Amino acid sequence: MSFFNLKSGEKLYYEDTGSGKDTIVMLHGWTSSHLIYSKPAVILSDKARCIIYDHRGHGGSKSAKKGAATMETLANDLHELICGLDLNNVTIVGWSMGASTILNYVKIFGCDRLKQIVLCDMAPKQINDNKWKLGLYKGQYTQQDRENDEKKNSFYQYKKFILETVPSMSKIPNFVLTRRLLLRLMKCNKSVISSLANSMKEQDNRYIVEKINVPFTYFYPDPGSIFSPELEGWYRENVKTDYKSVRFPNSTHLLIAENPQMFADELCKLLG
């Protein structure tokens, strides 16, 4: 087990495996952990150095919870990790909230230490409105929905998110599903994940996408679940640097867990 010491005194759990001329840093999503990348990291171990870690308030970093956590907080944590491990020419991969972390990193620190960016199934703006229909829940989640959700308890919101993410879970008996979700939430700090969820919904990172100046790749599931495959077209139109996309067929938002071999293979292609 390895822990990276932040300047605040808090610690982030991370794993540093593999070897090769390339370095890949992979960032997980909301209420997930580094484990989502365990299989791909093993597959890539003879091709690249792979660094996977738990965001503050998650998994092995559950106890890192000082202050109000925002997406900018996660971006600063990432910057400390990259600088602390003296990483350069990094292929940085972010899935879901991890993708939002990368956009915030670019906003604050730029791309100087990056070789390329890979975002996985994430919209730059969560809340949908009359002019934006590519946000959360395939364009159906509005500011009014957010305000309604805030009146409900946090477990209700989490369960709703999970059922939207993996619709097949609706077939699981409610008492069984509830127990599974509660056990999963026990691996996270409640206040941190609540704060991060609110921060993500407040952001509009569309303008940051246009500022990226390293190669950009978008991995997306089809038919997807919480985001529309049509997001790929938006990125294609708005990314100003070298752009690629990879479609993961018959996949949901959990495209990495569902297709670890394909995910690793496609990353390997990008390393060149």
Image (cartoon, rainbow, N blue to C red):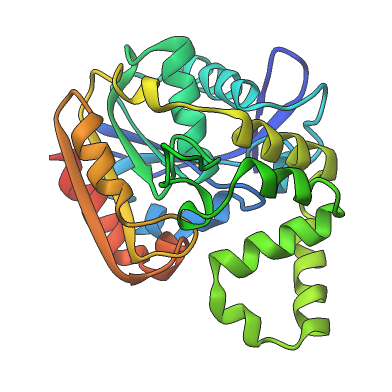
**Does residue 217 show up?**
no
In the figure, is residue 47 to the left or right of 4?
left
User: Which residue is drawn at the image coordinates 17% and 42% (left, top)?
Assistant: 244
Give residue 81's quadrant in the image.
Answer: top right
In the figure, is residue 57 to the left or right of 252?
right
User: Which residue is drawn at the image coordinates 32% and 47% (left, top)?
Assistant: 231
Could you say where residue 177 lies in the image, as x and y percent from the top left?
A: 75, 78
Where 102 falls versus 236 (above or below)?
above
User: Which residue is drawn at the image coordinates 55% and 81% (left, top)?
Assistant: 168
Instruction: Give the position of the C terminus as an image quadrant.
Output: top left
Where 8 falls versus 167 (above or below)?
above
Where 114 falls versus 117 (above or below)?
above
Instruction: Give the position of the N terminus as an image quadrant.
Output: top right
Could you say where residue 145 lies in the image, as x and y percent from the top left?
A: 68, 50
Give residue 61's quadrant in the image.
Answer: top right
In the figure, is residue 154 to the left or right of 268?
right
Q: Which of 4/57 is in front? A: 57
Could you say where residue 88 lies in the image, as x and y percent from the top left?
A: 34, 18
Could you say where residue 78 lies in the image, as x and y percent from the top left?
A: 54, 24
User: Which residue is drawn at the image coordinates 37% and 64% (left, top)?
Assistant: 260
Q: Which of 199/67 is in front? A: 199
Q: Which of 78/244 is in front? A: 244
**Does residue 204 show up?**
yes
